[in-house]
């Protein structure tokens, strides 16, 4: 039996809408998807899907990790990736090894306005500017240790309750 559009009945179908794109600002996001993508110039980029934890929207971002024509672009991309890994609390930020290990990381993301041309028309959107420790804007997120500071999270035990006050 052939499909007949004239007989299509959508009365029992719920509508769905695309998620909103994050507007410029600072957000706590979760990495919902991450994979390696080959670039047009023969390099490699990490493609990320980011979702705001408060449900305000989503954003896709690309981080260049190998740009054969530019050592500077490669360095900058790797610095961005390491910031994501550190601020997201990745267990091995110096050697993340498996791209799937980025999924589920919770990180602060700074989003800025982006102007671009598509089909000869100038448009405005959003793009990822950088990453930061999510505890800066979300007090419920534990502070991540900074590399090289030796800072670690600990539980304070009050062992001094029975000690004399020294004054």
Image (cartoon, rainbow, N blue to C red):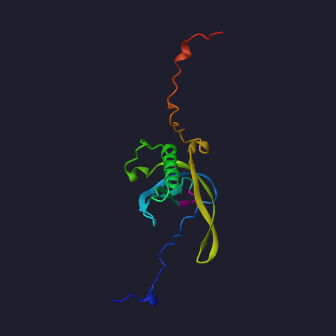
Q: Nearer the viewer, residue 151 or 41?
A: 41
Number of numbered discs present? 0
Residue sitting at 50 percent across and 57 percent down? Answer: 70
The residue sitting at the left extreme is 1
Q: Nearer the viewer, residue 116 or 20?
A: 116
Query: In the rendered structure, which segment of residues is drawn in magenta?
Result: 55-59
> Looking at the picture, does residue 43 appear above or below residue 91?
below
Q: Where, quadrant-wise, is the C terminus in this rendering?
A: top right
Q: Position of residue 54 (x, y in %)?
A: 57, 53
Residue 154 vs residue 167: left or right? left
Q: Position of residue 66 (x, y in %)?
A: 45, 56
Residue sitting at 53 percent across and 37 percent down? Answer: 146
Examine the residues drawn in magenta and state their main secondary structure. loop
Q: Where, quadrant-wise, is the N terminus in this rendering?
A: bottom left
Quarter of the rendering containing residue 119: bottom right
Q: Is residue 58 magenta?
A: yes
> Looking at the picture, does residue 1 appear above or below residue 40?
below
Residue sitting at 56 percent across and 57 percent down? Answer: 55
> Looking at the picture, does residue 26 appear above or below residue 12?
above
Residue sitting at 48 percent across and 80 percent down? Answer: 10
Q: Nearer the viewer, residue 52 or 126?
A: 126
Q: Position of residue 29 (x, y in %)?
A: 53, 52
Q: Position of residue 15 (x, y in %)?
A: 52, 72
Q: Is residue 154 magenta?
A: no
Residue 24 vs residue 81: left or right? right
> Looking at the picture, does residue 152 appear above or below residue 102?
above
């Amino acid at each position: 039996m052939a499909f007949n559009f004239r007989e299509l009945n959508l009365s029992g179908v719920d509508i769905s809408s695309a998620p909103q794109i994050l507007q410029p600002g600072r957000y706590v996001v979760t990495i919902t998807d991450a994979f390696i993508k080959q670039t047009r110039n023969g390099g490699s980029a990490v493609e990320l899907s980011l979702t705001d934890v408060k449900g305000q929207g989503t954003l896709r971002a690309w981080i260049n990790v190998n740009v054969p024509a530019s050592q500077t672009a490669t360095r900058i991309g790797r610095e961005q990736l390491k910031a994501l890994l550190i601020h997201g609390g990745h267990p091995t930020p110096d050697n993340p090894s498996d791209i799937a290990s980025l999924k589920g990381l919770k990180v602060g993301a700074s989003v800025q306005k982006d102007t671009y041309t598509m089909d000869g028309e100038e448009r405005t959107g959003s793009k990822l500017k950088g990453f930061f420790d999510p505890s800066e804007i979300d007090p419920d997120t534990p502070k991540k240790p900074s590399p090289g500071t030796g800072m670690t999270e600990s539980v304070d035990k009050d062992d001094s309750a029975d000690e004399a006050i020294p004054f």
